[in-house]
Image: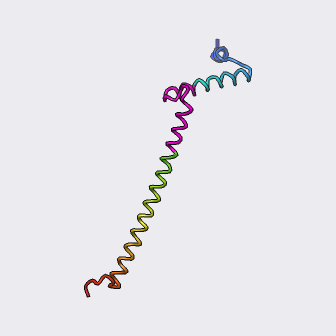
Amino acid sequence: MSEAQIERRKMVTLPQEDFEEILERAAERGARHALSEVGLDGPDAARDIHELRGLLDAFTEAKKTAGLTMVKMLVTGLVMALLAGAFVKLKLFGGAQ
């Protein structure tokens, strides 16, 4: 027998609907297995995922707030340094004359 004939014997043909059903079942099993591997299976899974999303939202908000605070501190420091320089330049502190 030639190799082409051997390869044809290994092939399986299915109707499109059956193939899609098999793919859908395999995808669902894979998803359930993946969720089970990370501990997100069972009756509390939806609540756990909701809590995880809440934690991620809070972390994102904290990062944004920290960034804005740093920018405000830098701008305030720059303005204070400029004012201090202006006061010294204008001798408003009663420094050396």
Q: Considering only vertical position in the picture, is 57 above or below 78? A: above
Res 75 → quadrant: bottom left
Magenta stretch, residue numbers: 30-56
Q: Nearer the viewer, residue 1 or 72?
A: 72
Q: Is residue 5 above or below residue 16?
A: above
Residue 16 figure quarter:
top right
Q: Provide the major secondary structure of the magenta segment.
A: helix
Q: Is residue 50 left or right of residue 23?
A: left
Residue at x 51% of width, y 38% of height = 52
What residue appears at the point 64 percent right and 14 percent down from the top-left corner? Answer: 6
- In this rendering, the count of numbered labels is 0
Q: Quadrant of residue 83?
A: bottom left
Query: Residue 23, image x and y in percent?
Result: 65, 24
Task: Look at the picture and state if 29 lies above or below 9.
Answer: below
Q: Quadrant of the N terminus?
A: top right
Viewed as shown, does residue 82 lie left or right of 18?
left
On the image, the x and y values in percent for residue 11 come to 66, 18
